[in-house]
Image (spheres, helix red, strand yellow):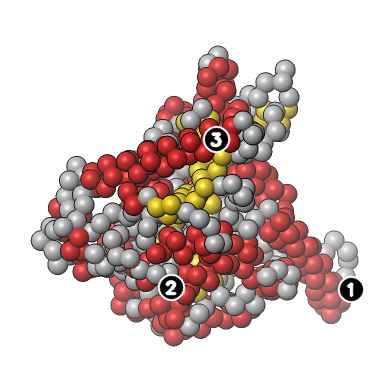
Amino acid sequence: MASRIILIRHGTTEGNAKHWFYGALDVNLLSQGVQTIKKYKKQGIYPEVPPWASFHTTGLKRTAQTLELIYGDRKYDEIPELQEIHFGEAEGKTFEELKAFPEFEAWANDVDGDAKFPGAESANEFRARVKRGTEILLDKHALNEWSHRHGGRDSVDVMVCHGGVISAIMDDFFPEVAGTMWDWIPEPGCGYVVEFANGKPYMYTKIGTIKRLSFNVDGFAVGSSGQSNQPVQTAQSAQTAKSDQSVQSARAIRGRFNELARQCVKRLYTLFDYTIGVFDESLFRRSLAYRFDRDSYKISAVVVPREGESKEKLRKRIAWSLCKGKVRYFDFISIAVDDGTTATVDESQLCDVLDALKSQGLARQGGVAWRGTPEGLELFLAKHINVDFVKFPVNYLDEYADGGLSTRLCDAARKYYKPGLLTAPLKDGLLADPGDEALEALHSLDDELLERPEDLDRWQKLREARGVRSGARSRKSGVRSRESGVLRPVNAPVSWAFRYAMGARFAISVVCGVSSAAHAVEDMNAADAFMPLTKVELKVLEEAAGKIAARDRIRK
C-alpha cells in the first residue's frame, strides 16, 4: 500500500508574469496560466490518483482553480496556514519597487530571518506558520492512511499551494539534501510527489515538464566528409566523389539524429540544446518538426554576438535559425556573455532582442549564457533583472579544485531569483573517465555502506521506488551485474557527475553534450537512477576532485 502526498504549485498569475512579490493577494490565474495547466495535463505530467484521494487548497482562488483544471470538480478542504508568505505593504511590488522601502537593505541581506516590510511576515514567522500547516496536512494524511489500511488501498493526498510553501515543506522533509530553500521552488503548475514509509518522508519525485537531464546536440555536425580512398582521374570526378561521400555522411548523421530524437521523446527527455551557427538546424526540421507535436519537445539555443553586431542583425540571425529548424519558437533563447563583453552587450542593447522575441511569440524565455566569473554574473544580473534564466557551467571539479566556482555561480544566480540551465557536468568528458586514483576515491563508500544495513536499506528503497532493478555497476564500465542478490551502491563515474549537477534544484535542467543515441540512452539510464548526494558523498567528490587536480598538475 502506497502512502504519498502530492504537492502542486498553482498556475501562472499576473503576479508571476510581472515578477511581483506577493502572497496575500487573492488573484486569479491568467489565461496563459490556464492554458499551460491544460497543456501539462494533456502531456500527462500529473500523477493519477485513486477516486478516494483527498484534496486540499489554501483557500485562495488560484489554488482552487489549479486543482479543478488538473483533477476536475473535486471536493476539497482548505488549509490557510499553507498560504504564501505575506509581504504587507510590499504586496504586489517588483524587485525594483521594493528598493524604495527603507527596510529593503535589511530584508535583502537578511541572514537571521527576522527582517520584514511593514505589516509583513518575516521568514521565520512564515516558516513557523508553514510548519503548523504541514502538521495539519500530515494529520489529515495519517487519518486517511489509517482509514484505508484495512482495505489495502493507497493513501493519497493532493495539496495545491504556493512555491515558497512547497519549498519550505520540502526543505523540512529532506534536510539532508544540501542546498537552500530557493532551490526547492517549482515552476508554476509543477511540484513534487513525496513517498512516506512508517509516517516519515523517505523519497521524492519531481513533477515537471523538463527532466533533470537534457542534451546539447552540437556534436551532430553535418557536411564533414573525409577524403575518398578510391583513385580519381579528373578534377570533375574528384569533386563528384567528394560530393557523394558528403551526401552519405549527411544521411548517416540524419539517421543517428532521428534515432536520438525518437529515444529522447519516448522517454520524455525532451529538451534539445544547441548553438546557433554550429548545429545544422535542418536536423530539427527532419527529426522533430515533421514527426512530433511541438509541445512534446523543447528547444534551447544560445547565440554568440559578433563584434559590432546590431540588435536588428542579431534578431534576424536568431529568426533565421528558427526558420531553418521549422520549430516555430524557442523555449529558451540566450545570449552568450562574459566579463569582457558585457559592455558591448549593454552599449548595443542586445538584451532588448530577448524581449522583442518574446513579444513576437518567437521565444518563451530569454536569458544569458554566462561564460565569465561569478562576480561578473552578479553585476550583469543587477543591470538586467528581466532576464528569465541563466545558463552556466556546474561540475564538481570546478567546485572543489577551483575555489568553489560552481557554488559561487549558483549563488549569483539565486541572489536574483534566476533558475539555471546547467552545463558541463562532465567537463568536456574529463569526469567520465577521471583516472584510477579518482575512481578509487569515488568507490571508497561501497564497503562502508554494505556494513551499515540501515544505509543500504534506505538506498535500496530509493532505488526500487524509481523502478531501477537490483544489480550493480562495475567501477569503470558502469555495466550492471548481480552479486549474491545484494544491490551494491556502485555508480559509474558519469553518474557521480550527473548527480552533483542535478543536486542544484533551482536548475531547469542539466545540459550534457551528446553525439549518438546510444550515448544518450546511457545518460538517460543514469539520470533515471538519480539520488541526491549525501554530505558524506560530497566529501568523497571533494577527495576525487583533488586527485584529478593533482594528476593534471603533474602532467603539466
- Left or right relative to 552: residue 45: right
Q: Amino acid at mark 2?
A: Leu
Query: What residue is rendered at 59% in x and 46% in y?
Result: 52
- Residue 506 position in % (x across, y down): 42, 51
Disc marking residue 30: 2
Q: Amino acid at mark 1?
A: Gln
Q: Which residue is mark 1?
A: 233
Query: What residue is rendered at 61% in x and 81% in y?
Result: 323
The answer to which of 483 and 196 lies nearer the viewer is 196
Tell me if label 1 and label 2 are in contact, CB under 8 Å: no
- Dot 1: within a 10 Å radius of its alpha carbon, few (fewer than 14), some, or many (20 or more) residues? few
Q: Amino acid at mark 3?
A: Ser
Tell me if label 3 and label 1 are in contact, CB under 8 Å: no
Q: Using the rendered image of the protein, determine whether residue 428 is visible from the camera's viewpoint.
A: no
Inter-mark Cα distance, 2 to 3: 38 Å
Q: Secondary structure at mark 3?
A: helix
Q: What is the total number of numbered labels drawn onto the structure image?
A: 3
Q: Which residue is mark 3?
A: 147
The answer to which of 371 and 488 lies nearer the viewer is 488
- Residue 287 position in % (x across, y down): 72, 68
